[in-house]
Image (spheres, helix red, strand yellow):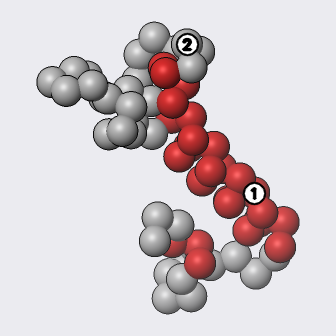
Amino acid sequence: MGMRRFTRLTKEFSKKVDNVTHAVCLHYLHYNVVRPHQTLTTRFATPTTPAMAAGRADHV
């Protein structure tokens, strides 16, 4: 449900396969690298992204 491109009711619906492929790749990149996850965050701490957990970044 995080990707509105799969809904035909929005204007972001892609008719080309290449556009859908790129949108899905960007979505997974954002989810797996940039987005803070609750499971990685310790109690009462700042949100932690997967890139921070891997040691690739020091801030969100």
Left or right: 21 with respect to 9? Answer: right
* Residue 26 shown left or right of residue 10 in the figure: right
Q: Secondary structure at mark 1?
A: helix
Quadrant location, the C terminus: top left
Residue in the picture at 54% in, 83% down: 7
Residue drawn where x is 81% and y is 76% of the image: 16
Q: Is residue 35 above or below residue 16?
A: above
Q: Quadrant of residue 29?
A: top right
Residue type, label 2: Gly
What residue is shown with label 1?
A: 22
Q: Is residue 44 above or below residue 1?
A: above
Q: Residues within 10 Å of mark 2 (few under 14, many from 20)?
A: few
Residue 18 sits in quarter: bottom right
Mark 1 residue crowding within 10 angstroms, few (<14) / some (14–19) / many (20+): few
| Residue at image mark 2 | 55
Which is nearer the eye, 43 or 33?
43
Residue at the (15%, 24%) spot, across then down: 44
Residue 56: image x %, image y %? 59, 15
